[in-house]
Amino acid sequence: MKGFFRITDHLARGAFVVAVAALAGVFVLDCFRIVSRYFFGMPQNWVPGMLALLTNWAVFLGVGWYLYVRETIVIDYFYEKWLSPSWRRRVDVLTSLVVVAFAVLAIRYGWNVYLRGDHQSSLSTLPLAYKWYTLPFVLGMLLGLIGTIKFLVLKPEREEAT
């Protein structure tokens, strides 16, 4: 099992790199669009569709990464001051189960959208199928699901080691 999680650790890092690259691509393409339109009078009609595509990849792979490494929003004041360690473990397990349930549903329905997404997207003048806008959502939720399962499976070992 640990070998599987080592592989998914590398895949998660790869997804993070792709998300960062997509975010950099959004910045570069938007700067290109502004310069092209306002300085040269040549609007690039394909750029908004690519911006939407790259934004999807950046956001959903980024969310998958943060779910994988468990860097979610926590109100530390309430969590650490008001909850004992045993209640913190219960809250962690409960929130993990909610993430698992949401991720499973998101993967199931997102995959169905991906399979049916062969039609042309109206977001771009480029011939991009709609499924390329859906794929990062499915991959991000899969990453979040694996990371949450990893947390649930390996958490008792971490607590015994401390």
Image: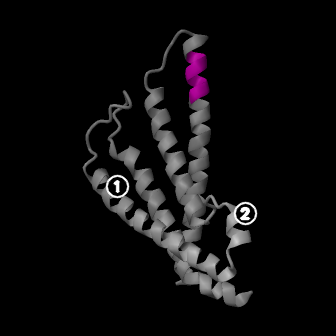
Inter-mark Cα distance, 1 to 2? 35 Å
- Magenta residue check for 125: no
Say which quarter of the image contains residue 65: bottom right
Say which quarter of the image contains residue 82: bottom right
Instruction: Tell me where the magenta segment starts and ends, as one range.
Output: 30-36
Q: Answer with mark 1 or mark 2, whichever residue precedes in sequence.
A: 2
Residue located at (46% from left, 68% from top): 98
Q: Give the residue number, with chain letter if any, for mark 2.
A: 77
In the image, is residue 108 above or below residue 62?
A: below
Q: Nearer the viewer, residue 161 or 91?
A: 91
Does the image show residue 5? no
Residue located at (58% from left, 12% from top): 38
Label 1 crowd (10 A; few <14 / some 14-19 / many >=20): many
Across and down, in percent, residue 107 comes to: 37, 61
Badge 1 marks a residue whose secondary structure is: helix
Across and down, in percent, residue 109 comes to: 31, 57
Residue 28 is marked as none
Q: Nearer the viewer, residue 42 or 134?
A: 134
Q: Give the residue number, with chain letter if any, for mark 1.
A: 110
Label 2 crowd (10 A; few <14 / some 14-19 / many >=20): few
Indicate the amino acid at tag 1: Gly
- Magenta residue check for 32: yes
Across and down, in percent, residue 79 comes to: 67, 68
Badge 2 marks a residue whose secondary structure is: helix
